[in-house]
Image (spheres, helix red, strand yellow):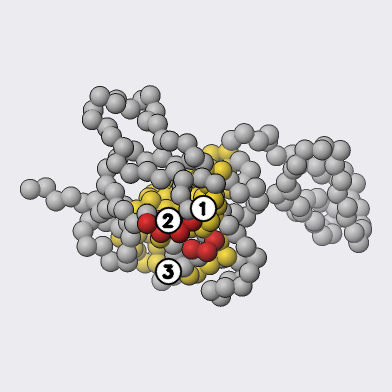
Amino acid sequence: MKKNIYRSLILIIGIQVIGLNIHAQLPSSIDTTQNWFLSWSDDFNEEDPQLDNKWESQNGPSGHILCSRWRENAVVKNGVLELQARKEKRGGQEWTAGNIWTKKRFKYGYFECRYKYAAAEATNNSFWLMTKGNEPTEGKRFEIDINEGHYPNEVNTNIHQWSDITIDKQGKKTHYSYHKGFPFGAKPGYSIQLEIPISVKKVRLTSRNHARFNIGEFRVYGVNDGKYPM
């Protein structure tokens, strides 16, 4: 008998995303004659306490994340799940946020989630598949990030192989990872460079564009013998 090398997976929805009340449909590329059937779903069309029937939360901090994540930040209302980020000190962090993962475990299948990005930079709007627990009882421990989305127009996909840890020459633990990012929707970024250097104590930026926009980077260069930028 061939040993199954895959552990069961849980689904995770993370930090400030909104699930919409729309049922999943298989894409046209999938052959629906091969006995596909819906085995699990949630449209969040229930009262907030019922969220605990299918989902659980981290309820604590993570070392590499700049917020702690709690069940209180996951709020169900009017058929929508809101994972809320709040400026409050808890769990040793300056911010709190919401995340949930399924109590049910899965193996092979087609997984779909529909959600809306939080309209703020520095948030990680995520949908993952991953094994659970530090010590696997069978097969490999890994993580598949279907989308770690960043407002306004970035989709990041990742694969982490957590079982095969190696030590580099500096003694740092590493593991195999694969990453690929996709921008979408928004126009390319613009760069405005002053042809004549100026010296100021204050800078005020204004725009004639009434649409909302975001400044992703603002650079100020020091004096360097007339060669700008450094």
Say what amino acid the circle numbered 1 marks: Val
- Residue at the limit of the structure toward the left, as seen here: 1
Residue at 54 percent of width and 61 percent of height: 73
Residue 38 against residue 203 in the figure, above or below: above
In this figure, which residue is indicated by the disc labeled 2? 50
Residue at 42 percent of width and 69 percent of height: 172
- Residue at the limit of the structure toward the front, as seen here: 47
Say what amino acid the circle numbered 3 marks: Lys
Left or right, 226 with reference to 30: right
- Residue 211: x and y in percent read 77, 38
Residue 14 against residue 31 in the figure, above or below: below
**Quadrant housing residue 97:** bottom right
Q: Does label 2 or label 1 sit earlier along the sequence? A: 2
In this figure, which residue is indicated by the disc labeled 1? 76
- Residue 141: x and y in percent read 30, 58
Distance from disc 3 to disc 2, alpha carbons, whole Å, reads 43 Å
Q: Residues within 10 Å of mark 2 (few under 14, many from 20)?
A: few
Marks 2 and 1 in Cβ contact (< 8 Å): yes
Distance from disc 3 to disc 1, alpha carbons, whole Å, reads 41 Å
In this figure, which residue is indicated by the disc labeled 3? 172
Secondary structure under tag 3 reads loop
Residue 206 against residue 55 in the figure, above or below: above
Asked if one can make out residue 108 in the rendered structure from this viewpoint, the answer is yes
Marks 3 and 1 in Cβ contact (< 8 Å): no
Secondary structure under tag 1 reads strand
Q: Residues within 10 Å of mark 1 (few under 14, many from 20)?
A: many
Q: Does label 3 or label 2 sit earlier along the sequence? A: 2
